[in-house]
Image (cartoon, rainbow, N blue to C red):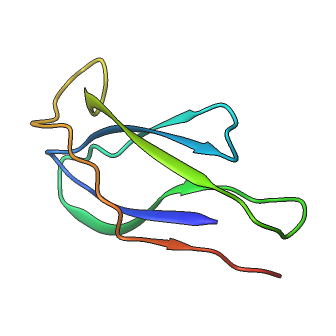
Amino acid sequence: MLWFAKLGAENGEAAVSIDGGPAEVVDTYAADDIWGVAAYRKEFPTSGRHTIHIEILGQRGAHPNERSKDTLIFVDGIRVEEE
């Protein structure tokens, strides 16, 4: 499973959890705008139904440096493949 996002100067952090498990913080800050980046990746041992939860944390990216201008999070797409 891949979450594709836009990285950029106005972007912040999100917490991603799968199937109610522990969240992983994803920082989507970048000095330049970069579209279609695989911001998060998860592989599953077996195929089946899963739930992804993306929570906007309201924190600026590049934390604690806080060079980000805002806390935006973009979802360009989610791709799921079965092998």
Q: Is residue 49 left or right of residue 73?
A: right
Quarter-of-image position of residue 75:
bottom left
Q: Which residue is drawn at 35% across and 70% down?
A: 76
Quarter-of-image position of residue 55:
top left
Instruction: Please state the horizontal and vertical placement of residue 69, each as a whole percent of the image.
Output: 9, 36
Nearest the viewer among 73 and 32 is 73
Quadrant of the rendering where the N terminus is positioned: bottom right
Instruction: Please state the horizontal and vertical placement of residue 73, each as a whole percent of the image.
Output: 28, 49
Quadrant of the rendering where the C terminus is positioned: bottom right
The relative height of residue 59 versus residue 33 in the rendered view (above or below) is above
Quarter-of-image position of residue 11:
top left
Q: In this view, does 32 lie to the left or right of 15?
A: left
**Total tally of numbered discs in the picture:** 0
Furthest-right residue in this view: 46
The relative height of residue 63 versus residue 78 in the rendered view (above or below) is above
Instruction: Please state the horizontal and vertical placement of residue 12, each as a whole percent of the image.
Output: 27, 38
Q: Is residue 37 left or right of residue 50?
A: left
Q: Which residue is drawn at 70% across and 47% down?
A: 19
Q: Residue at x 53, y 48 (%)?
A: 53
The relative height of residue 13 versus residue 19 in the rendered view (above or below) is above
Q: Which residue is drawn at 24% across and 20% down?
A: 65
